[in-house]
Image (tube, rainbow, N blue to C red):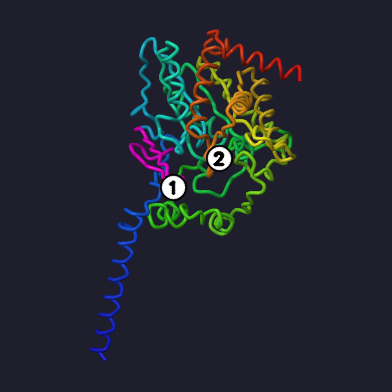
Amino acid sequence: MRTRLKHWLGNALLALGALVATLAVVEFVLFGVFLKPDDVVANVSINGVVRYEPGRVAVFRHPDGRTSRITINKDGWNSTIERYTSTRTPGRLRIAVIGDSYVNASQVNVEDAFPEVMSRRFGEKGMAAEVFRFGMDGAPLSQYLNVLRREVLAYKPDVVLVQLIHNDFDESYRFLKTRYASSFLKIDVDESGRAHEIEPVEFRTTIADVLRSSATFRYLYYETNLYLTLKGLVQRYFWGGQEVYDPAHIVSGIDVRTLDDMPRMSRVARYIISEMGKLAETKGFKLAFSMDAVRETIYGRKDEQTQKAGTLNHIAADAASHAQLPFLDLTNMFAGDYATHKQRFEYGYDWHWDERANQLVGETLADWIMEDPRLLGRKGPAAENEKAAGAGEKRG
């Protein structure tokens, strides 16, 4: 009996060793060398703000064979600036750009993201400037207020630019069932229409973060697009959400089925932008907002869904106007460029801006900041173009 048990245990250990060795080869050789997935960058909370683990470098591999590189600086933000400092260099303008994945911009190399383009554009125009960016994947407009308060103010910027996209509004009050959505500041609106802030929860790692650390998991889940197939199941049974992913309802990267309560989104946007405006006034910096276009409309699609997404541009413009703050809708810029070149502004597999779009956006925003009298106030052709475009809209 004892001999048989020892034999059984020996075989079990041998099988276990073979399994471990096989998994190690799959993890470190197959998916670590030959079929490498995207690198992973962990998240952390510092000073009440969720960000990326400082001091990391990551490479992302895209379906068209491209790769892009991000460099997370010592403060936890993707940037070419190794460390942000509150110390100011006399005569050097300081711009802070706040946003989500469009500001993080992991789809292009770190130096090709629009904040870095802005920095170069200022230099080309004879203005010494540094651009600090604070981009966090998935962050909504409400979190931008949290980032401004807890992070950006410490660096004493001259101008703060907030880059808006279409999922910034409903996600400012909806609690998404994702890895770190509760780590974002949220805004609740009561029956009387008053806004109340719901403080973010400190980010903590879960089993999802453990799985993402495995190259095998990342390849099988992300690179094969299995995550799109399983997105609804994961949301429902892992995170406890109710949303069912359906690409037929996606416009400008947002599920238009979540846009039914426009009045609520308007109240939330007005509250957040007003709070930001108060900070700008008391702390002495200039504040401006820009927003992405509904690019499907530029490419010729005009239906109820694109119209619904476009309403968010009007909500943002109204909130900025109500707070008497500068707002630039990037629609005219994108539409004009597309009419001339007939080139789209994103890669075929992802809705984020491609390298060329980042170049256009960076130049446009830098010119706007330099020329708008409410910001730096230099006159130039971009100011005249924007003025003409606004006059055209009024005539229309």
- Please tell me the numbered disc located at residue 351: 2
- Please tell me the numbered disc located at residue 204: 1
Q: With respect to residue 97, does 40 lie above or below?
A: below
Q: Amino acid at mark 2?
A: Trp
Say whether disc 2 or disc 1 marks the residue closer to the N-terminus. Answer: 1
Foreground mark, 2 or 1, reads: 2
Residue drawn where x is 40% and y is 29% of the image? 111
As drawn, the residue found furthest toward the right would be: 396
What residue span does the magenta drawing correspond to?
51-74
User: In the structure shown, which secondary structural element does the residue marked by tag 2 occupy?
Assistant: loop
Q: Quadrant of the C terminus?
A: top right
Residue drawn where x is 52% and y is 23% of the image? 161
Could you tell whether 154 is left or right of 82 in the image? Answer: right
Q: Quadrant of the N terminus?
A: bottom left
Task: Please identify the quarter of the rendering in which residue 215 is found.
Answer: bottom left
Q: Is residue 393 visible?
A: yes
